[in-house]
Image (cartoon, rainbow, N blue to C red):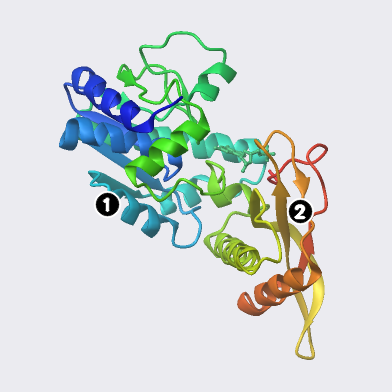
Amino acid sequence: MFDPKQFIEESIAELKEKITQTAIIACSGGVDSSVAAAIANRAVGDLLHCVYVDTGFMRKYETDNIEEMLDDIGINLTIVKAGDRYFKALEGVSEPEAKRKIIGGLFIKIFEEEQQKVDAKCLVQGTIAPDWIESGGGVRDTIKSHHNVGGLPEDMTLIVVEPLRDLYKDEVRMVARELGIAVAERQPFPGPGLAVRCLGDLTPERVEVCREACHIVETELEAAAEAGLIEIPWQYFAALLPVKSVGVHGDVRAYGETVVVRAVTSLDGMSARYSPIPHDVLTKISTRITNTVKGAVNRVVYDITHKPPGTIEWE
Ligand code: XMP
């Protein structure tokens, strides 16, 4: 039987031995990197630098929430506001794979800059067992593994420390609860963030529309679950489509954008079924989206595709 308390104590002792020089960790706000950061922080304190890159594709309030959460557990945090760099790098790019590559590449560049600033010699990663089992296993002592927004460079000769590498997700969540970390029950969020939920031109204005729409879907479905109307889906969000359609605003013809609402049940994201959301709840979501982002969005649709054949995200 897994004992999170014992795991934490043993990991702290182990990390105290392994981390003798400046260390760095990339924190996404997700449960794995937050737990790894919290344990390493307890082990070596200010020897650990935690870097959070705000790409401009975060959800509403996300950066503030993450900052607060990491501050609560006493992490030495650097927030890199990189939205301008990301939008510039992605200007005119809408092909999904090209976008992901640019986003991953820029993340690496920014992370390397931060690593050089503090002259880190050690890299702490929140890798868990399924991550390395799925990527073929094997022993790694220099950096090779993936980050959730892309692979880190192989020529980075840092000593890699992976305190969670033998744990499964449910065990990481138990450790998070034991550490008092508030992220334990978050829904999954893709590494490239809202960039893969904003199809077509990636402009700050369009990403903002997508951010608002996502926030509305999240708050309405959470309220519906709270009221007992639905079971909270495994994942739920909005995406902005590259489709414009004709509508009316007052008495005037409008040519606006389309938002798709997506909510799925799943165990592990490998397959999924769309959630049967009651029409009243969908109506509320639709009205709020078209009222909130007036002028920009005049059509809201609901995605009724399972995975397969669809994927959960649209890109
Ligand atoms: P798809 O869209 O492939 O997604 O059905 C399955 C699950 O993975 C998440 N996802 C990602 N997570 N980095 C991540 O960390 C990514 O690049 C990424 N792309 C998709 C998605 O949100 C879903 O939970």
Q: Quadrant of residue 212?
A: bottom right
Which residue occupies the foreground of this view, 13 or 218?
Answer: 13
Q: Is residue 260 above or below residue 149?
A: below
Question: In this view of the protein, can residue 298 be seen by the observer?
Answer: no
Query: Percent position (x, y) of residue 108?
Result: 41, 32
Image quadrant of ligand 1 equals top right
Q: In front: 299, or 139?
A: 139
Label 2 vs label 1, nearer the camera: 2
Q: Determine the CA span between mark 2 and mark 1.
A: 35 Å
Where residue 3 sits: x, y (%)? 39, 29
Q: Residue at x 18, y 31 (%)?
A: 44
Residue 132 percent across, percent down from the top left: 51, 19
> Which residue occupies 22% across, 35% down?
42
Label placed on residue 275: 2
Q: Secondary structure at mark 2?
A: loop
The residue lying at 69 percent from left, 75 percent from top is 290
Q: Are marks 2 and 1 in contact (CB under 8 Å)?
A: no
Residue 71: image tag: 1
Q: How busy is the neighbourhood of tag 2: few (under 14 within 10 Å), some, or many (20 plus)?
A: many
